[in-house]
Amino acid sequence: MNINQQPGSRKIIIIGAGFGGLSCAITLAVRGYEVTMLEKQPVVGGKLQSIERAGYHFDRGPSTITMPHVFRSVFEYAGRSMDDYVHLYELEPRTRNIFADGSVVDLSRDASVTAQQIAAYSPEDALNYPRFLQEAEALYQKADTQFLNTLLLSWKDKLKPSMGKSLLRVRPLTTLQLLLRKYFRHPNTLMLLGRYATYVGASPYQAPSIFAMMAHVEANQGVYGVRGGTYQIVRGMEKLALELGVQIRTGVEVNRILTSSGRVSGVETDQGSWQAPLVIVNGDVLSANRMLLPQEQRPSLPDRRIDAYEPSLSGFVTLAGVPQQYDQLLHHTVFFPEQYEPEFQSIFGQKKPPVQPTLYICHSGYSEPELAPPGGSNLFILANAPYISDQWNWQEQRESYGQQIGKILEGYGLYGIRQGPVWEHYTPEDIRRDTYAHQGAIYGISSNGPRQTFFRPGNRSRDVQGLWYVGGTTHPGGGTPVVTLSGQLVARHIADHL
């Protein structure tokens, strides 16, 4: 099949149909552009996919939904109500946190309720929790006004006085762990709140303190479930895109970005060529450059510079369909090990999976029993894992590490978790295969340190005119709502200025 489109000023090709690509396509379609999306997987969604096994429903990918206003804004920009496409419901408690000493903290919208639970093991930490939330809210407000909703396309944008003042305010050289230690002393509290660094693929011992803002985002703005599973957000965005005239072609793999005289001219795929004067990559910036552009056409991002970026952490996912239920589990539950720091030393230092990982479980059937057979549990289990390197072979270790995870969970009282009709694993190698994520990293590059947090690869190619990027590797960063913002920001800039 050979499909050609003649170049025209209103034609745009988007490579990849994840959250960033879909939000970008919708916004551009509203502004009158002819958008064609090309997705290599059989369905849209990127890293988020809907899986059905033996009557159990799973969302493989992002499962903690925050900042719902970002998703609503995609639909509102098109003059629609998100409620006609997707139904969100607030979770209270937000997340159950279970510690090795038996302590349990169910994160609540009511700070006094959360503090009361913290007081059971540390009265001092409990007293400081409300004050910490005020700091987290201030960091969020600064990020929201100066970073999250602004494209930083040039050094002039990055070095303007307001940006400099904001950077000083968020103390970019202070790690999240150091900020937390201003308020808290007990290891449980430090783990509870340090975990937010993993939301952007980083370590709390290296990530900047600005990510403390996630404490405000979750506790005060809320954590949400999605009726029918998280993938319904993707389905709703896909439906809206199609209504607006976006052409979505799945099962189409882009092999090369075409250029002429330093300008993008289209793409070459396994099913022919598409021509357009603007191409937007919704995917990993590093992989896209290495795979789709010869090195001589990208002097600002040669292979050596790509290799210099530290990838984010990845994940080892287990889907467990179990014909029983567990009293320990809410919709979201986290089991913490005795010590936290060895996990990140293993992941980023040794580049090996931790022996005692933190384990996150999404049991959406807790809120929606119909997502599993009667009396059953549909468990999405995530262990933080290193990005792909020569230090670990997932093909050889896949099953043994999966059994290790199962034994740990049985030690937490989740007996029989490995004996259900569904017990399967998804590794960093699988993530790389399906999405071309650089070295299998979930969030693109890590946010370990200020450079990789505040000065990520740009949304606009410095080498090829008309080539743009949206997604977790580029500005404003990783995480489902932030990636969605990335698509909106690029689309609006193109429509307003090009």
Image (tube, helix red, strand yellow):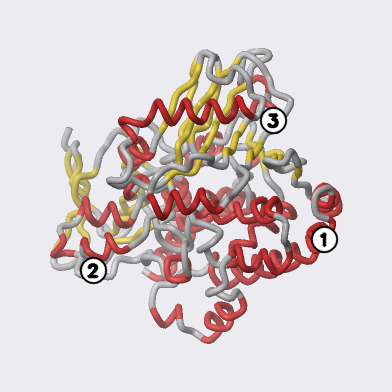
Closer to the chain start, of discs 2 and 1, is 1
Q: Nearer the viewer, residue 38 or 314?
A: 314
Q: In this view of the protein, which residue sits in the foreground, 400 or 321?
A: 400
State the residue position of label 1. 124
Q: Secondary structure at mark 3?
A: loop
x 42%, y 54%: residue: 348
Measured as percent of width and height from the top left, residue 434 is found at 34, 37
Q: How many marks?
A: 3
- Please report whichever mark, 3 or 1, sits nearer to the chain's N-terminal start: 1
Work out whether mark 3 precedes mark 2 in sequence or the reverse, and give the earlier one: 3
Q: CA distance from mark 3 to mark 1?
A: 28 Å
Quadrant into which the N terminus falls: top left
Horizontal relation, residue 188 to residue 451: left or right: right
Q: Looking at the picture, does residue 423 appear above or below residue 70?
A: above
Q: Quadrant of residue 253?
A: top left
Q: Is residue 25 above or below residue 498?
A: above
Give the structural element (helix, strand or loop) at label 2. loop
Q: Position of residue 16 (x, y in %)?
A: 35, 45
Residue type at mark 2?
Answer: Asp
User: In screen coordinates, is 372 left or right of 219?
Assistant: left
Q: Nearer the viewer, mark 2 or mark 1?
A: 1
User: What residue type is disc 1 on?
Assistant: Glu
Is residue 174 toward the left or the right of residue 366 in the image? left
Q: Give the Cα distance between marks 3 and 2.
A: 50 Å
Give the CA distance from mark 2 to mark 1.
Answer: 54 Å
Task: Identify the residue at horizontal 27%, vertical 37% (top origin).
Answer: 252
Q: Is residue 239 visible?
A: no
Q: Nearer the viewer, residue 153 or 413?
A: 413
Q: Which residue is mark 3?
A: 329
Q: What residue did someone put label 2 on?
A: 463
Q: Are marks 2 and 1 in contact (CB under 8 Å)?
A: no
